[in-house]
Image (cartoon, coloured by chain):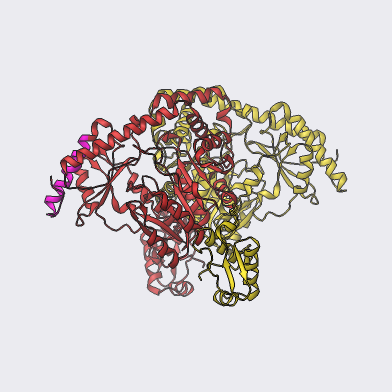
Chain colours: A yellow, B red
């Protein structure tokens, strides 16, 4: 009897044996009145203890599938006597698991009773220039009557790629080096599954964007965290790590970094390219924020210093054009790009055409630049308001003023476990991102990420006030000293 | 000196060593005038032959990076003397490769000088009810002014999932069991990467849909092909294989199967579920065609007989609604579904919202059913025309008449290598899918798949005539006997 037992499963062996017989009986492969092997015989065949088989048979009997006749043995019960087996998905526990439960899933779950969502890095709908986006979309659909009946090629629509090429013209990237992706997240995953395998070393900023941690963990990579300084990733530590390990890839978010908001200096951008060339690793540069600066534009992308194809660049269009289109663009060259296009083709045969055409039209629109300037201005006003409110209510709390993007990274006293603080915040109808979500090791930290772009503007003051109240209550309840004074 | 050599690379070891020094010199980590290790010393350190290091140093010297001084050693040349290194992507050959070049990529490449595309399984634009689709889309965008600024949740928009639940109401699937995917292809990949790992056994129909072969091959699975009979997969072989291997998953396309057009009988559908339960494997039921029947509706999906959650069901909406939206829906339960949602979240954080809203509106539209009936009628007319033309011009060629879907599977004499025949067809401005693309082993076969839905209706007669001419020429040039007479 060939019962596929999984010794290291969550499901006890006797339950696995029981389930095996239930399946066989339910599907009539073991027929009514048929005798089951003796306890002794089955235990021997399977190499398990007698008591294990006994327990399995007892369970089967309890569930009404078999009956025991003293001195004769165990037999399959009459069909009519078996209740219709309920939907039993316990066998699913036996299925191999190659994907961990997405961290981001837990974070993105709808929160009940949350009025002030400071957790999201997404922009609130009122920040988008909706009339323009909607009218452009309708125009695209009406101007190209056959559009909705067409497929995109695996690497993306040529008009989309030309529009992206033109948009990032300072980098001089031809459309042929551009791959359309369904958001930047898909770009990260395509790179990971193409170039990163189990035990490969991946270097990540600590803290970093939580969604990227999931991707590399799901690939079974060994993640080495590199600290982030005021001017971006710590180069000294990076070099030491490179000498010790043989990294395959460095994932970085160099401009208004998610979550710390720091921007990698020009000097360090050039250094990173040199280091990647020397140690033969890839840099994956994720750049969702660089156009959303408040005053001075940030330095050019790392990719623009790359002469040898060591940098793969990702640009997402959800943050400043249309989240509902979920488009991104990946830039790479040569064999790297060929492999990524193959991976994209296997993944979904290519992104949907309609969102590509919409993003292309928006990027080429004469209203694009004014719309972007308006968005920058709005975000800057929100950042300033958030900063002033925090400064007023928590004068001793120091944090870095945002120069772009949509989030602030707050550092609380060391004793604060921000996961516990989040529970307090929920009582104040408030959510934020606890800092541990941004570290690959998921240890408790004293940091939190709050967004100044995710709630309606008129609710921002209340949201910040609720945050301060939650902190205050938490401080009193946990008698934490050195807390920012109120 | 820590040079990461790859012994089994396409790039010879001496070139790898040379490239290592070029990178170090270019990035100034080896400075002008600095001495390289001696040939003997480096060979010993790296465990390679003396001659390998000699060759590496010669190459470096030829490229102008170093100079040799008799009796002193090898030194980095003065900076000014080094020409700016050209874009050299040879190092990319060293990057680990976890993804094979997508088979589907080769197939989907634009074919020059192809006038009659009989290779695609996609429907020609004229088959879609474009006015209705376009107007519905514009309506969706104008009725929901904030739509384009919103994200979908990872498992999909609730309105989309409700519309799908209602559409497949005979299966009684609640919206909670539905996961929105970017086309059925993404569904296949999500299942593969969640439940199939290296060396896991995957059972596939032979022949089958080529895009699915790529997915499971990319996972490193062991693919066991099961023949397809007139009424679907061969159950006897399946049972024998199940006894011999421990399959993880069976991928099947039970209705108007791509490429053979066969439909799994009701009896076999029930058997498949029983077998999956008994042997504890998953069935992945890919169902893009079932609504596109010509006369009688096909039997209900395998999933509708599944009481224990062993079947994962996939429905794509590109074939009869809108390819430019590339939406699909996956149906599963319990832990399987949870894991698949996690995998989807890691892959792209969720499909774009706009296409989901469009498909939901189309499915709920009062014009949906008439539009589908019109499409069925058109496809039936095309199938009949194609059949009559082939029958008239190649009376001895026997093939199965299509009862639904968009393709015909033609079987030629055994001597015909259809990959070679395709070259002949290209001379006739024609393309088709050679049968070998549909087998996991990719051996030459005598089958070809042609589509009667991919060219404009008025070009279908010419396309079939060109196909017959290509066959005729090929027969004469290769002196093949037993060829269908003309």
Magenta span: predominant SS is helix
Q: Position of residue B255 (x, y in %)?
A: 39, 45
Residue in front for this viewpoint, A404 or A100: A100
Q: Position of residue B259 (x, y in %)?
A: 33, 48
Q: Is residue A209 left or right of residue B238?
A: right
Q: Position of residue B196 (x, y in %)?
A: 49, 57
Residue in front for this viewpoint, A135 or B292: B292
Q: Is residue A106 left or right of residue B33?
A: right
Total number of numbered discs in the rendering: 0
Q: Is residue A304 visible?
A: yes
Q: Is residue B472 magenta?
A: yes
Q: Position of residue A314 (x, y in %)?
A: 51, 43
Residue in front for this viewpoint, B243 or B137: B243
Q: Is residue A302 visible?
A: no
The C terminus of chain B - image quarter = top left
Q: Is residue A380 left or right of residue B400?
A: right
Looking at the rendering, the stretch of residues picked out in magenta corresponds to B461-484
């Amino acid at each position: 009897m060939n019962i596929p037992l999984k010794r290291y499963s969550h499901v006890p062996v006797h339950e696995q044996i029981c389930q095996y017989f239930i399946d066989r009986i339910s599907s009539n492969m073991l027929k009514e009145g048929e005798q089951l092997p003796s306890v002794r015989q089955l235990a021997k065949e399977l190499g398990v203890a007698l008591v294990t088989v006994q327990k399995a048979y007892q369970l089967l009997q309890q569930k009404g599938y078999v009956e025991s006749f003293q001195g004769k043995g165990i037999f399959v019960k009459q069909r009519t006597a078996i209740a219709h087996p309920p939907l039993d998905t316990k066998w699913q526990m036996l299925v191999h698991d190659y994907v961990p439960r997405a961290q981001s899933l837990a974070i993105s779950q709808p929160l009940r009773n949350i009025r002030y969502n400071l957790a999201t890095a997404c922009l609130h709908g009122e920040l988008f220039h909706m009339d323009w986006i909607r009218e452009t979309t309708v125009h695209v659909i009406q101007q190209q009557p056959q559009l909705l009946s067409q497929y995109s090629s695996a690497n993306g629509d040529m008009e989309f790629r030309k529009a992206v090429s033109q948009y990032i013209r300072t980098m001089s990237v031809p459309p042929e080096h551009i791959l359309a992706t369904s958001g930047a997240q898909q770009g990260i995953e395509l790179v990971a599954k193409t170039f990163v395998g189990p035990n490969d070393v991946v270097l990540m900023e600590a803290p970093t964007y939580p969604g990227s941690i999931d991707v590399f963990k799901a690939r079974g990579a060994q993640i080495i965290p590199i600290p982030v300084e005021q001017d971006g990733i710590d180069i000294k530590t990076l070099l030491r790590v490179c000498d010790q390990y043989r990294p395959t890839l460095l994932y970085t978010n160099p401009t208004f970094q998610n979550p710390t908001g720091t921007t990698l200096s020009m000097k360090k951008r050039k250094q990173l390219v040199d280091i990647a060339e020397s140690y033969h690793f890839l840099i994956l540069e994720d750049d969702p924020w660089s156009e959303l600066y408040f005053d001075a534009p940030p330095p050019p992308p790392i990719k623009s210093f790359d002469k040898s194809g060591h940098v793969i660049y990702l640009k997402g269009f959800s943050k400043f054009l249309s989240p509902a289109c979920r488009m991104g663009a990946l830039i790479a060259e040569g064999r790297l790009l060929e492999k990524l296009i193959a991976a994209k083709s296997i993944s979904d045969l290519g992104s949907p055409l309609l969102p590509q055409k919409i993003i292309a039209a928006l990027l080429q629109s004469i209203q694009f630049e004014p719309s972007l300037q308006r968005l920058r201005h709005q975000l800057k006003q929100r950042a300033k308001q958030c900063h002033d409110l925090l400064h007023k209510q928590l004068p001793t709390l120091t944090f870095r003023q945002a120069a772009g993007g949509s989030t602030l990274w707050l550092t609380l006293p060391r004793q604060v476990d921000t996961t516990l603080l989040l529970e307090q915040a929920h009582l104040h109808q408030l959510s934020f991102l606890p800092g541990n979500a941004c570290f690959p090791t998921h240890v408790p930290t004293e940091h939190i990420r709050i967004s100044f772009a995710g709630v309606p503007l008129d609710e921002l003051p209340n949201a910040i006030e609720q945050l301060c109240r939650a902190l205050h209550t938490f401080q009193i309840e946990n008698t934490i000293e050195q807390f920012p004074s109120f």
